Amino acid sequence: MHQLLTALRGAGEVTRLRIIALLSKGELTVGELVQILDQSQPRVSRHLKLMGESGLLDRFQEGTQVFYRVATGGVAGALNTTLVELMETDIESFAEDMESLMAIRRERAERAQSYFQLNANDWDRLRSLYVAEEQVEQELLRQQGSNQIGSLLDIGTGTGRMLELFAPYAERAIGIDVSRAMLSIARAQLDGADIGHCQVRLGDMYELALEDQSQDLILFHQVLHFADEPAKAIAEAARVLTPGGTILIADFAPHDQEFLRDEHAHRRLGFADDEIAGWGRSVGLETKSLSHLDGGKLRVTIWNFGKKA
């Protein structure tokens, strides 16, 4: 009862209801909220502080920026869900806010498009070396099957493509990456797909800020070849994997394309089947399946690990 009353007090103001409505569509920074709400930053920050103290919002620091998102768990999360449902019956009252939100999303999309145009030649050259990415995605989905996922974690999310691909099967999903530039692109991509239950965060694959046994499916999509300590990254993923959960790793088999090390910062030129399987086995994972996709100069391997229930 105390938690409910605290949450109700935290939501009991027009601007705070507007904030909940906006953040239900995706995470925003203080600056973006100031722009949409057309209020001073101190005033908006004060609302956010009170709402955070009441449990209505989650706050995430990313470099010099702070992102906010509506809480989804506990009493405050249930209240947020109810309030959003009620507000959507009177969406005209929030129409101007939503138009401003769409303008910010368009700006994000334009920045992302500029990045891709600037780097298009490098992307195209790399992708020409291996089987079409669509085939890799289809194989990952086939490995997952049609099973519903409670919690999904995408390590090294990049553009957020894996979140978008697996979103229909996940109740909630989070992608982490060490690159703020890539996180900006991922946010723009998720905005465009209107995937509200997926989010991205600045994070370290070696020290995941997640509880033990909290993730049902974990993805490493073309990530481990950038890692200084890939075995350590797999061990950390195993720590947060639920019993009965799955880890899917898609990466290159051993190859001799040295330019990937020199021009694209690849630390490893692929991995042998037994190498990654051995790392998984050492942290209590069992290999459920192993598949290879040939096409071009590089072979893509997909390791499917399970954790005993």
Image (cartoon, grey):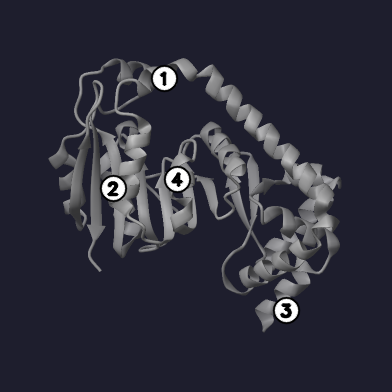
**Residue bearing mark 2:** 234
Q: Is residue 50 above or below residue 248?
A: below
**Residue bearing mark 1:** 124
196 relative to 54 in the view: left or right:
left
Identify the image quadrant of the C terminus.
bottom left
26 relative to 95 in the view: left or right:
left
Say which quarter of the image contains residue 51.
Answer: bottom right
**Residue bearing mark 3:** 5
Secondary structure beneath dot 2 equals: helix
Amino acid marked by disc 1: Asp
Q: Is residue 106 visible?
A: yes
> Going from the N terminus, do you reach mark 4 or mark 2 first?
4
Amino acid marked by disc 2: Ile
Residue beneath the point at 52% across and 33% down: 182
Secondary structure beneath dot 4 equals: helix
Residue positioned most to the bottom: 1
Q: CA distance from mark 3 to mark 2?
A: 43 Å
Secondary structure beneath dot 3 equals: helix
Residue beneath the point at 42% across and 55% down: 152
Is the C-beta separation of discs 3 and 2 under 8 Å?
no
Q: CA distance from mark 3 to mark 1?
A: 55 Å
> Going from the N terminus, do you reach mark 2 or mark 1 first?
1
> Going from the N terminus, do you reach mark 3 or mark 1 first?
3
Residue beneath the point at 84% across and 48% down: 96
Secondary structure beneath dot 1 equals: helix
**Residue 149 percent location from the top left of the image:** 41, 60
**Residue bearing mark 4:** 165
